[in-house]
Structures are given as structure tokens and as C-alpha cells.
Amino acid sequence: MADRSGLAVILAAGEGTRMRSSLPKVLHPVGGLALVGHVIKATLAAGISRRVVVAGHGAEAVSAAVRTLDDKAAIAIQTERLGTAHAVLAARSALEEGADDIVVLFGDGPLITAETIAAARAKLAEGAAVVVVGFHTDAPTGYGRLLMQGDALLAIREEKDASTEERKVTFCNSGIMALSGSEALALLDAVGNANAKGEYYLTDCVEIARARGLVVTAIEADAEEVAGVNNRLELAVMETAFQKRAREAALMAGVTLQVPDTVIFSHDTVLESDVVVEPYVVFAEGVKVAAGARIRAFSHLEEADVGPGAEIGPYARLRPGSEIGEGGKVGNFVEMKKAVLGPGAKVNHLTYIGDAEIGAKANIGAGTITCNYDGVNKHKTVIGEGAFIGSNSSLVAPVTIGTGGYVGSGSVITKDVPDGALAIARGRQVTFPGKAPKPRPKTKG
Ligand code: UD1
Ligand code: MG
């Protein structure tokens, strides 16, 4: 498809009243990414060079979200909701600029794949003027029916305009349509609104194109792939489908998921081969895990980079900006934020490491806290290579522990510790032989 230019028109004007939300429907997330974001990603993966998103309800928020994925995307506004053809025509100026292939998609259908978009474009390349993406369902009520004659698509009949016979057809319109760039505007401009809903139907392009002697056909996609979201129940179903797809892709790419159904992925999770994921792990956005690392049970990772062979958890929390070096270990009840752990370094128990840099092979004892916040600003803790921080120490930032430095347990470190130095900062112990109280105080009852 590299030789053909493409323009995607993504319809996202719907209010989505059944979501019962102040957020525009297409901005509700699946796998941590807005519904319309998934559609944009699919069009990018299908090699479509330009995008225009038709917004209405919540246009400003929709536009901002769209631009984070494609900063050149155009936003067209449909002020009145007069039908799907009318919505596409809101993008008239982009359509006038032209492209070989125009692909119309709905912004609330996040599971559409690049392969299906490419298959529709391939039919255009073979000479079709209109290609509709259809799907089979046992419950066709509400969908436009595809009236086929062999490979030719004769018409799409909307539910309200269909005869009893036509309503029995189970091959339905997903709403995704590819149109030849040289015909698209003329076809859309010819659409009228003399139908049961009084709307300008995009689907009328089919009969108009046929009347002009153009080739019109349909391809089939999986019903799940082209499903849209109208309420929170459907959003939850979509999330489940997305997670299933993400788990299967990870497994097929050489990742072990011990109990796949308990692992939650984001749209951008990257797990290399031979990563092992134990049960109940959440990958929030922006996580990359290198080959051979192990993510142990009940861990939560977000915007984190885990190096090869590292071990995280069980019960670890990696917050944004966590970078774990090769073979590093982050154990139970450890929280890290904006912190780099050098290769082979260990933070094994009950610790908070924030705004810190920890050198290779350093050992951070149980209960260590980097005191990074003075109530106004955040400060950095630097721990050198091979340093040892004794258990239950507080490192009051900004502070540096030098290479090979050693901090005695229970210290509150407020001054830098030079390379190779031992620092102890705690109350001295006083011992009185034979002075233990006798008899020992008893608890009541
Ligand atoms: C549409 C199709 C139908 C198909 C079904 C799949 C038409 C005429 N019918 O029907 O064949 O089976 O989708 O779900 O195209 N939209 C706008 N502006 C408008 C009207 C719609 O942006 O003026 C957007 C909606 O927000 C929605 C999409 O277009 O995302 C489809 O509109 P909707 O009213 O849901 O159409 P359906 O009746 O479901
Ligand atoms: Mg609909």
C-alpha cells in the first residue's frame, strides 16, 4: 500500500449519552488508551498518512487526545447531527485535498486491526470504488444489512428501512467503509435524506456508486473486531477482549504468563521474550521489560523500564521513572519512583526509593527511606557503586553516599558520606547490667 496515499476520516461526534459520563464517549479508555486512540493507532499501522477526526460533543478534549498520537491530525467539527454521510462531509476540506484511499471509521470501535484496514484498501487498489467491512452475527437487529450478489454489494439497508425479508440477512455493516479518493466527494454529495430516519446515510454511497457503474464490494471481519462501545457494559466487554488479545500476543511472543487471566496489560506494554510474569500483575502505561526478567506476583508497574534478568516483587510498586538495571532486584513492599537502580543492585524489603540514583551492586537494607521531599521541593539521593545501606536508615536528600560507602543500621543521614566511609547516625545504646525491672510488669487480666 506504500504507493497509495490514504486519508482516514474518524467519526467521533457522538455524545455517547448511554455512557452516563461527563467524558466524551471516544475518550473512555481501553487498555489505558482512549477508544479513538486505538483507531488512530490502527490507521497509522495500516500506513494511512493523514487523519481527520470529526468531533462534536467535547471537541476540545477529543482534539487534545487525538493530537498526542498524531500531532498533524486535522479536527473537523460537526455541529448538527444529521447522519453519517453528513458527518464525513464535515471533513470536506481534507477530502478536497484528496488521497488515493479514503477510509471512514467510527471512533468508538477500538479493536479494529491494521490488517482489516489494509484488506479494504487492497480492494480499492484492485479497482473497487467502495469497499464495506461487514461481519456476521446471529443478532443483526439495529445494524445495516449488506445485500450481496456474489462478490458485488448491491445495497446496505438500514434496520428501519428494511423489509421483513431483508431483516433476515445476518451479514451486517460494521460502519467501516473505504472509498476511492477520486469518487468519494461526488458520492457523498449525492447522498439525500429521504429515509425512515431523515438522515444523510453514509451507507447510501453503495447504491449511488452502483448506479454510476462503479465496482462496490464487501470484505468480512470478525464481529468482535468491529464492535463499538455505547455504554459501560460494552466498555467492560471491550476491555476484556483487549486484555485477551494482549495476553495472547505476549504468550505467542515468548513471554510466560503463569495465570494469563490475572495479568493486566496496557496498550503500550512491551515484554521481551523469556520474561516470566507471575499471577496478579498490573502493567499500567509505559512499561518495558527486557528479556529474562521476572515480575513476581501482585506487582504494579507504571512508566518503568526493567532490565534483562531483573526480578521485581512479589508486591512491588514501580512508579513513573523507575529504571531497573540488568539483574537488579526489587523485593516485597518496595516502592520506587523516578529512580535508577544500577545493574545487580538490590532493594529487597519494605523500602521507599524516590528521586534517586543507585550504583551497580549496591545493597539497600530493609526499611530504607529516601526522604526526598521537604514539603516544598523534591531532592535527589545518590548512592554509589557497591554501597551498603543498613536497615531502617533514612537518607535525607539532597545527599550522596559515595562508592563503597557504608551506612550503619538505623541511621538518619543528613550529610554526604565519602567513598569508602562508614557513617553511623543514631542514638548510642546504654546498657545497665542487672537493672531489668523485676518482677516484670504484667498485663491486666
Ligand atoms: C450505523 C450504520 C449501520 C451500521 C452501524 C454499525 C449508517 C447510516 N448506518 O448505524 O449500517 O450497521 O452504524 O454500528 O451509517 N455519527 C456522527 N454524526 C452523525 C451521525 C453519526 O458522528 O450525524 C457517528 C456516531 O457518533 C457513531 C457513528 O457515526 O459513532 C454511527 O452512528 P449511529 O447513529 O450509531 O449509526 P447507526 O444507526 O448505529
Ligand atoms: Mg450505532
Image (tube, helix red, strand yellow):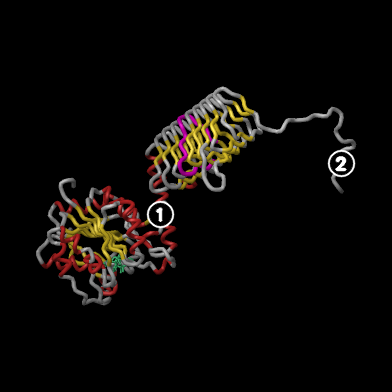
Q: Residue at x 75, y 30 (%)?
A: 429
Q: Quadrant of residue 52?
A: bottom left
Disc 1: CA contacts within 10 A as few (<14), some (14-19) or many (>=20): many
Ligand 1 image-quadrant field? bottom left
Circle 1: residue type: Val
* Residue 210, horizontal then vertical, whole percent: 13, 65
Q: Nearest the camera: 184 or 357?
A: 357
Q: Is residue 326 magenta?
A: yes
Classify residue 121 as left or right of residue 426. left
* Residue 410, horizontal then vertical, whole percent: 66, 33
Q: Is residue 361 magenta?
A: no
* Residue 138, horizontal then vertical, whole percent: 34, 63
Q: Residue at x 56, y 29 (%)?
A: 363
Tell me how many marks there are: 2
Residue 319 numbered mark, or none: none
Find the magenta span and give its range: 316-330
Residue 30 numbered mark, or none: 1
Circle 2: residue type: Pro
Asked if residue 302 can be seen in this view, the reply is yes
Q: Secondary structure at mark 1?
A: strand
**Residue at the right extreme, as displayed:** 439
Asked if residue 150 can be seen in this view, the reply is no
Residue matched to label 2: 441
Q: Earlier in the sequence, mark 1 or mark 2?
A: 1
Classify residue 123 as left or right of residue 315. left
